[in-house]
Image (cartoon, helix red, strand yellow):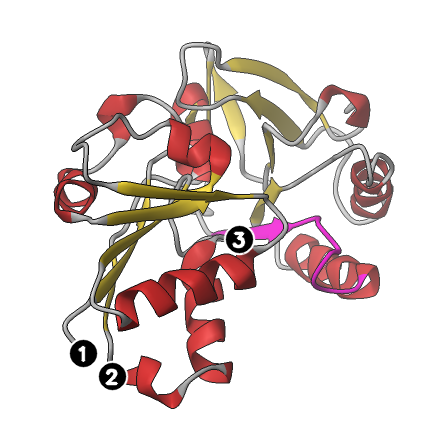
Amino acid sequence: MTGSLVVVGTGPGKADLMTPATRAALNRATDLVGYGPYLDRVPAIRADQCRHASDNRVELDRARHALELAAAGRQVVVVSGGDPGVFAMAAAVFEAVEAGDPAWRTLDIKVEPGVTAMLAAAAEVGAPLGGDFCAISLSDNLKGWTTIERRLAAAAEGDFVIALYNPASKARPHQLGQAFDLLRKLKDAATPVLFVRAAGTAEAKVVATTLGAADASVADMRTLVIIGASTTRQVGRWIYTPRSERRT
């Protein structure tokens, strides 16, 4: 097969947070495949480039379409936001490869790393991910809520900093509040909580509070929520988690 497929992330928003490797892949592409708003972040490069936009909830269909294009000899780039390997299109592409045409396994497929939302959100406030941390998506579209609760409890008991992706949507308005209720039983009420909306963009907004006072209604799907560990603390206007568990 002469085609290729590269999965890229455009970063969290600002054009200068897109990696040079991603820009190079976009420049080489004959076809760009992705969720419409993410494709809109990519400026027009050449008149002969084809764009294939689709809805947010058809990741597997999008991945199959991209693989079909690559199998037909096209130079395809699948566009995600953030990092394509974090709750994004890279996993969908390989899921489609596993279940699809065996010939797809011989395609030239690459993944270019990007700047994910949790890194951009952390940079807005200092270094809250400076110690051990984990990332959990609150979306139960592809996994059960009981699984999410089990993982939240395990992260709290392990004293990880927790970055919450997909904290709220119109279809899931109550889950972040349920997550906070669970965590309040396991973590100190004074634990720092950060709501970072539109991280990595000119519209970035930070709300810093505590687990005891956190209001779930602050968050929407553009918000990344960071819940600190027992060592997370504030220094001036910055919030960080020390690398060492020993207090200095």
Residue 103 at x, y percent in the picture: 32, 86
User: Is label 2 in contact with label 1 (beta carbons under 8 Å)?
Assistant: yes
Quadrant housing residue 221: top right
Residue 115 at x, y percent in the picture: 33, 39
Q: Quadrant of the N terminus?
A: bottom left
Q: Quadrant of the C terminus?
A: top left
The tag earlier along the polypeptide, 2 or 3, is 2
Q: Is any atom of residue 79 visible in this view?
A: no
How would you rate the neighbour count of disc 3 (Cα within 10 Å): few for under 14, some for 14-19, many for 20 or more?
Answer: some
How would you rate the neighbour count of disc 1 (Cα within 10 Å): few for under 14, some for 14-19, many for 20 or more?
Answer: few
**Element on which disc 2 rests:** helix
**Element on which disc 3 rests:** strand
Quote the CA–CA distance across marks 2 and 1. 8 Å
Quote the CA–CA distance across marks 1 and 3. 38 Å
Q: Which residue is mark 3?
A: 134
Q: Which residue is mark 1?
A: 1
Quote the CA–CA distance across marks 2 and 3. 33 Å
Relative to 156, does residue 11 appear above or below in the rendering? above
Please identify the residue farthest to the bottom as the structure is shown: 102
Residue 156 sits inside the magenta stretch: no
Q: Is any atom of residue 85 visible in this view?
A: yes
Side of 162 where 179 appears, left or right: right
Q: Which residue is mark 2?
A: 106
Please identify the residue farthest to the front as the structure is shown: 48
The tag earlier along the polypeptide, 2 or 1, is 1
* Viewer-side label of 1, 3: 1
Which residue is more in the foreground, 28 or 23? Answer: 28
> Which residue is at 38% across, 61% downward?
66
* Viewer-side label of 2, 1: 1
Residues in magenta, as a range:
133-144
